[in-house]
Amino acid sequence: MTATTRSNLGRPKFGVVVLTMGNRPDDLNHGLASLLRQREVDLDVVVVGNGWQPANLPNGVKAKGLASNLGIPAGRNAGVPLVEGELLFFLDDDACLPANDILARMAAQFAADPRLGMIQPRVVDPQGREAPRRWTPRVRVGDPSRSSPAMNVWEGAVAIRRDAFEFAGGWPEPFWYAHEGIELAWRVWDGGFHVRYDGDIDVHHPAIQPTRHAEFYRFQARNRVWLARRNLPLPVAVLYVLAWTGVSALRLRSRTAWRETLRGYRIGFTEPAGERRPMSWRTIWRMTRAGRAPII
C-alpha cells in the first residue's frame, strides 16, 4: 500500500474515466464541466464512448471510442490505461459533482489513511426526489448523511487507489451490468484495504429506478450467483445465494420479474462466470467486524 502520488505542483492526481453511450450529451457536458471545476487536484480525464466515438470534448479531455457496447464494467476498464494518477475516479455521464472541492476532499482522506482503498460519496437527486436505498451501501440505511464502512458501492461516482483497483482486477467485465460495485468492493477489502461510504460528500444523480427494465431482474439474479462463484469460499457462497434467493422471493411483484429472475439464476449456475478468486477467511472476518459479512 502506497501513499498518494503527487504531481509536480504538489497536488494529488486523479485519472478520471467518464463512461457514456452518447445518448445524454447535455448531461455529459454538465458532468465534464463539474470535473474541470475541481480545485487543488490535477486531473487526467478520458471519455469512453461505449459503442461510439466521443467528439467535441473540452480541451485536454481525451476520447476513447469502442466499436461496440462492451457493457458498463468493460467500458470503465477500457479507460484506465489511458489516464495517469495513483488515484482513479469513475463518473457516469448522468452524474456530476455539485461542489468544486469534492475530489480534493477525497484525496485528503486517501493521503491520511494508506489503508483506505475506495470511497463512495453520498448520492443526491438534484431535484430533491427521495434517494433509492441502494445508494446507501449498508443493510440499515438510516440517515444517508452518516458515513460508514461499505461492503459494496454505487458505481456511478467512486474514487479508488490505482493499486487497489489493480489488485481487484478492475471491474468484473462478464457482469455487463449490475452488482459490479459489490465485487470491486469485496476484492478491495481482500487486498487489505477498507472501503468507505462518505455521507459528508455529495454527488448528484437523478433518482431513476432500474426496475423499469425487465433485464434488470435477469442480470441481478445471474450476477448474484456469479458473485458467489467468483469470490466466496464454498460454504459462504451457498449461504449468500440462499439468502438472496429468499430476499428476491419477498421482493418480486410481477410475473415478468419472476420469469427474468429465474432465468438469471439458471444462467448464473450454468454459464461460465470468469476467474474464481475466493476471498480469504481473514477478509470475511474483517468485513463482519466492520458491520456486514458477505452473506446479505
Image (tube, rainbow, N blue to C red):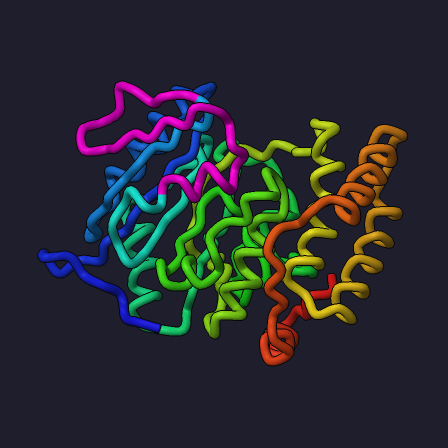
Q: Residue at x 62, y 60 (%)?
A: 276
Name the residue nearer the viewer: 3 or 69. 69
Q: From this viewpoint, is residue 147 visible?
A: yes
Q: Residue furthest left?
A: 9
Quadrant where the N terminus sits is: bottom left
Q: How many marks?
A: 0
In the image, is 90 to the left or to the right of 225? left
Quadrant where the C terminus sits is: bottom right
Residue 232's x, y, as percent?
A: 68, 66
Name the residue nearer the viewer: 8 or 167. 167
Q: Residue at x 33, y 50 (%)?
A: 102
Magenta residues (range):
52-79
Residue 271's x, y, as percent?
A: 73, 44
Is 278 part of what is drawn in magenta? no
Residue 85's x, y, as percent?
A: 26, 54
Name the residue nearer the viewer: 21 or 64. 64
In the image, is 134 to the left or to the right of 6? right
Q: Residue at x 21, y 52 (%)?
A: 41
In the image, is 50 to the left or to the right of 185? left
Q: Residue at x 41, y 21 (%)?
A: 52
Residue 26 lies in quadrant: top left
Residue 209's x, y, as percent?
A: 66, 33
Q: From this viewpoint, is residue 98 visible?
A: no
Is 56 part of what is drawn in magenta? yes
Vertical relation: 30 (above or below) 162: above
